[in-house]
């Protein structure tokens, strides 16, 4: 199966951590039971804000550059990098470049949807119900 990310609707996270989240795969949306895959699209100057998850997060940088903060340490990254956010450790991704930062985020095991991610799951469910 091919997933056309540009066709999948997302949900806009309100400021100050403005970005668009698109759920591509998750147990709630597709037949995938082992992981959650979402795309995070961050405009220049914006950030995810400091946050943590109860599962590991692997982030592939499809486009853009920025800084990754984890455990109080900042590291610069660019396109074609992989960022790793350990479970239960606060981390933040900031777009410091001039182009849109696109992250392909994989959570293993699957992320338990809550808050804005839960809203993104509902948007994705509506999309997939029409396919």
Image (spheres, helix red, strand yellow):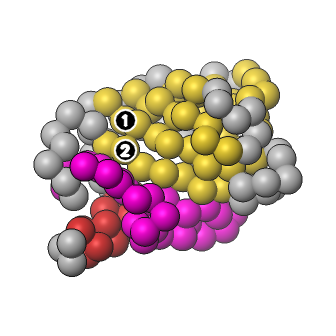
**Front residue of this view, candidates 69 and 105:** 105
Residue found at x 54% / y 52%: 40
Work out whether mark 1 precedes mark 2 in sequence or the reverse, and give the earlier one: 2
Residue found at x 58% / y 27%: 83
Specify the segment rendered in magenta.
Answer: 1-28
Residue 55 % position (x, y) = 35, 31
Q: Secondary structure at mark 2?
A: strand
- What residue is pinned by disc 1? 107
Disc 1 residue crowd, few under 14, some 14–19, many 20+, Cα 10 Å: many
**Front residue of this view, candidates 120 and 15:** 120
In the rendered image of this protein, does residue 54 appear above or below residue 95?
Answer: above
Q: Secondary structure at mark 1?
A: strand
Instruction: Point out the image quarter for the C terminus.
Output: bottom left
Horizontal relation, residue 107 to residue 63: left or right: left
Does the stretch in magenta take in 108? no
- What residue is pinned by disc 2? 37
**Front residue of this view, candidates 111 and 114:** 111
Horizontal relation, residue 66 to residue 82: left or right: right
Q: Is residue 65 visible?
A: yes
Does the stretch in magenta take in 23? yes
Disc 1 vs disc 2: Cβ atoms closer than 8 Å?
yes
Name the residue at the front extreme.
1
Residue found at x 47% / y 30%: 58
Residue 53 % position (x, y) = 42, 37
Mark identifier at residue 10: none
How far apart, in angstroms, are the residues tagged by discs 1 and 2? 6 Å
Residue 115 % position (x, y) = 39, 61
Disc 2 residue crowd, few under 14, some 14–19, many 20+, Cα 10 Å: many
């Amino acid at each position: 199966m091919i997933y056309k990310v540009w066709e999948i609707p997302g949900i806009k996270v309100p400021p100050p951590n403005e970005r668009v989240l698109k759920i591509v795969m998750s147990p709630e949306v597709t037949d995938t039971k082992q992981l959650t895959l979402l795309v995070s699209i961050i405009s220049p100057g914006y950030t995810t804000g400091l946050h943590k998850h109860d599962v590991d997060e692997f982030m592939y940088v499809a486009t853009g550059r920025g800084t990754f903060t984890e455990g109080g340490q900042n590291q610069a990254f660019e396109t074609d990098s992989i960022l790793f956010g350990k479970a239960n450790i606060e981390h933040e991704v900031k777009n410091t470049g001039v182009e849109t930062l696109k992250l392909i985020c994989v959570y293993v095991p699957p992320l338990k949807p809550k808050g804005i991610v839960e809203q993104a799951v509902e948007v994705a469910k509506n999309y997939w119900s029409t396919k």
